[in-house]
Image: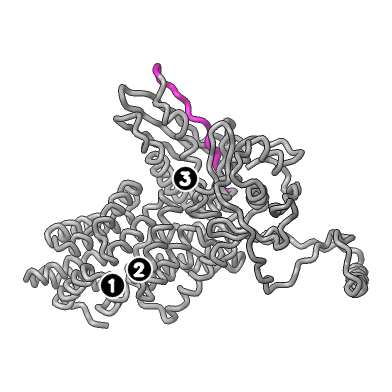
């Protein structure tokens, strides 16, 4: 992000030329799974429109006009910021945002060539013109002349309409006694949160007497910046100067024998208050996985710290929450939920935020999460009266942001409730690819793997979630409960029981774990223990039932169904009602 004025116009980039040098008459090109319409400035994937900000859109136009050619940073900056002085960090941010919009294919389509530039690695082919959008064409109020001559049969009507519009404008002006009416820009929650949590990643310092490993020196800061930029609406800047954002990250690396130690801290800008710091040690400094590991753990830890600071800010006496605060507080409620009141409060906050900005992906995905939580009922919620509401909201969020991790999880949950876990699994997997630092995304993916019968892979995702969120109470208790179910499905009742006990110890108000304990107790003839654990389960989850357990866990896997039916047998014996 740079300090350039937002009114600078993009340089027009023409559509790719045809085989004989002429512009392609359709003005639509296709590449990979995408189509781009140069005339309408519209990117689509599988028929779904993908919104682009002006700079990433201009970058895409330039790349499409120059496929499979290494484009220097100087050339790209001259094209995108003609006449404006910016740093390479502006280009880095632009490339990162465009890659994000291209989803899982982004890094493959736009490749980095060190010290040379970027290349668009795709065949660009003429495509079919897209059907016109069912919305009226926008009229530029600043335009006084048309850039194309009107056809003879259209010129007169256009002139008449222009004259009528001018007369109406003059009339309104006269009635208002010369007052000038200016429409305020609509409030955008996602953009506001992007500004509030914008961060500069400065180069890391090598402070040892011997150089730290090359892999860390040359790639760690870039990897962290890349992972931070995966979050919805994030503004991440790579710069030697901490200016230009609300936060600044710096770090140091020092060689320790064959290993390396890394320290990272984040400060506020400009006052320099340290808000987060962490230390990492690795015995093998040349391990190629170091950078990604640190980046994932740092991104996850910093995200939790943002929630803590936000919580302290909005709890101050007399503080009034604005729409961005409401959306962020709603997500804080969801991430820490323990009771149905937590979920209800989150839902109310998201709904209020959406009244100010109905298109906010942050608020829409949050509302989806709240509604889905009410359907799952793990915080003790009754089944919603309108179960389809969660699907309607999830569909809107997914259509607006098909590559956002939270919208992918919401739409995957819809498939689960529709009894189609096989369709949900690739969505969960993509969510992890889009937000690999999210422990919650890992847990949802693990649950998806479990119900399709891939329990070994599920455990790997559970372990990764625990590694990413060791200080997040809800992540820890959910991980142990899910690990318990995984062990039970595999037929290891003793391990499943021990893990469920660990889940209860970590989160005594998480009712699902008591249900697992009650079922295993009943299956093994421990009647008194089964009754005691079922009573606690019923106290925390009074609306749970066999019917609801089945709807939460659909499957076509024989392995999973065998374990699920055995769990149901134990739950019935322990006293869980059918409905």
Residue 96: give x, y in percent of width and height: 55, 46
Q: Which residues are magenta?
A: 196-210
The residue shown at (59%, 64%) is 49
| Nearer to us in this view, 201 or 317 | 201
- Nearer the observer: mark 3 or 1; the answer is 1
Marks 2 & 1, CB-CB < 8 Å contact = yes
- Determine the CA span between mark 2 and mark 1: 8 Å
The kind of secondary structure element at disc 2 is: helix
Q: Position of residue 382 (x, y in %)?
A: 35, 76
Label 2 or label 1, whichever comes before in sequence order: 2
What's the colour scheme? one colour
Q: Nearer the viewer, residue 200 or 132?
A: 132
Which mark is first along the chain, 1 or 3? 3
Task: Residue at 32% x, 68% y: name it.
Answer: 378
Q: Is residue 449 left or right of residue 80?
A: left
Q: Secondary structure at mark 3?
A: helix
Q: Is residue 19 left or right of residue 194?
A: right
Residue assigned mark 3: 227
Q: Residues within 10 Å of mark 1 (few under 14, many from 20)?
A: some
- Residue 422, disc: 2
Could you tell me if the residues under marks 2 and 3 are in contact, i.e. CB atoms within 8 Å?
Answer: no
Magenta span has 204?
A: yes
Tag of residue 556 = 1
Q: Look at 85% across and 61% down and name the residue there.
A: 148
Where residue 480 sits in the image (x, y, percent)? 25, 56
Q: Residue at x 84, y 59 (%)?
A: 142
Find numbered disc 1 in the image and state the secondary structure of the residue it sits on: loop
Q: Which is nearer the eye, 411 or 331? A: 411
Q: Main secondary structure of the magenta part?
A: loop
């Amino acid at each position: 992000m740079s300090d350039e004025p937002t009114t600078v116009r993009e340089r027009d980039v023409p559509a790719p030329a045809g085989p004989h040098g002429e512009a392609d008459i359709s003005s639509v090109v296709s590449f990979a799974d995408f189509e781009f319409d140069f005339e309408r400035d519209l990117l689509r994937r599988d028929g779904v429109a993908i919104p682009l900000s002006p700079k990433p859109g201009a970058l895409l136009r330039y790349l499409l006009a120059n496929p499979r050619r290494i484009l220097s940073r100087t050339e790209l900056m001259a094209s995108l910021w003609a006449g404006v002085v910016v740093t390479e960090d502006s280009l880095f941010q632009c490339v990162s945002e465009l890659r994000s919009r291209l989803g899982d294919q982004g890094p493959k389509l736009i490749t980095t060539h060190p010290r040379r530039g970027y290349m668009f690695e795709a065949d660009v082919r003429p495509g079919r013109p897209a059907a016109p959008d069912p919305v009226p064409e926008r009229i530029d109020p600043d335009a006084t002349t048309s850039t194309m001559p009107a056809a003879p049969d259209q010129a007169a009507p256009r002139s008449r309409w222009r004259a009528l519009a001018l007369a109406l404008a003059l009339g309104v002006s006269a009635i208002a006694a010369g007052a000038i009416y200016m429409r305020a820009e609509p409030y955008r929650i996602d953009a506001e949160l992007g500004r509030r949590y914008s961060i500069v990643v400065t180069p890391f310092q090598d402070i040892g007497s011997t150089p730290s490993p090359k892999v860390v020196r040359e790639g760690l800061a870039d990897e962290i910046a890349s992972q931070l930029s995966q979050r919805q609406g994030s503004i991440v800047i790579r710069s030697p100067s901490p200016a230009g954002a609300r936060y600044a990250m710096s770090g140091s690396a020092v060689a320790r024998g064959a290993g390396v130690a890394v320290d990272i801290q984040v400060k506020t800008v400009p006052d320099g208050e340290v808000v987060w710091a962490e230390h990492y040690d690795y015995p093998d400094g040349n391990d190629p996985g170091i950078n990604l590991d640190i980046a994932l753990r740092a991104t996850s830890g910093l995200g939790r710290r943002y929630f803590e600071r936000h919580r302290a800010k909005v709890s101050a006496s007399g503080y009034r929450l604005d729409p961005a605060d409401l959306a962020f507080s709603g997500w804080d409620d969801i991430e820490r939920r323990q009771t149905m009141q937590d979920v209800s409060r989150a839902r109310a906050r998201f709904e209020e935020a959406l009244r100010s900005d109905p298109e906010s992906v942050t608020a829409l995905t949050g509302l989806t999460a709240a509604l889905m939580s009410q359907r799952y009922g793990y915080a003790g919620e009754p089944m919603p009266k309108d179960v389809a509401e969660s699907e309607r909201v999830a569909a809107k969020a997914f259509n607006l942001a098909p590559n956002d991790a939270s919208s992918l999880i919401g739409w995957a949950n819809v498939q689960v409730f529709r009894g189609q876990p096989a369709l949900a699994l690739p969505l969960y997997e993509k969510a992890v690819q889009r937000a690999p630092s999210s422990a919650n995304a890992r847990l949802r993916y693990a649950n998806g793997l479990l119900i399709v019968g891939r329990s070994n892979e599920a455990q790997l995702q559970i372990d990764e979630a625990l590694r990413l969120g060791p200080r997040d109470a809800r992540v820890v208790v959910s991980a142990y409960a899910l690990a318990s179910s995984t062990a039970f499905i595999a037929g290891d009742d003793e391990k499943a029981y021990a893990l469920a006990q660990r889940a209860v110890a970590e989160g005594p108000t998480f009712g699902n774990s008591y249900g697992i304990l009650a079922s295993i107790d009943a299956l093994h003839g421990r009647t008194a223990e089964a009754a005691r654990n079922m009573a606690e389960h019923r106290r925390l989850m009074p609306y749970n039932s066999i019917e609801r357990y089945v709807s939460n866990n659909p499957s076509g896997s024989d392995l999973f169904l065998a374990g699920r039916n055995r769990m149901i047998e134990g739950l019935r014996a322990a006293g869980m009602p059918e409905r």
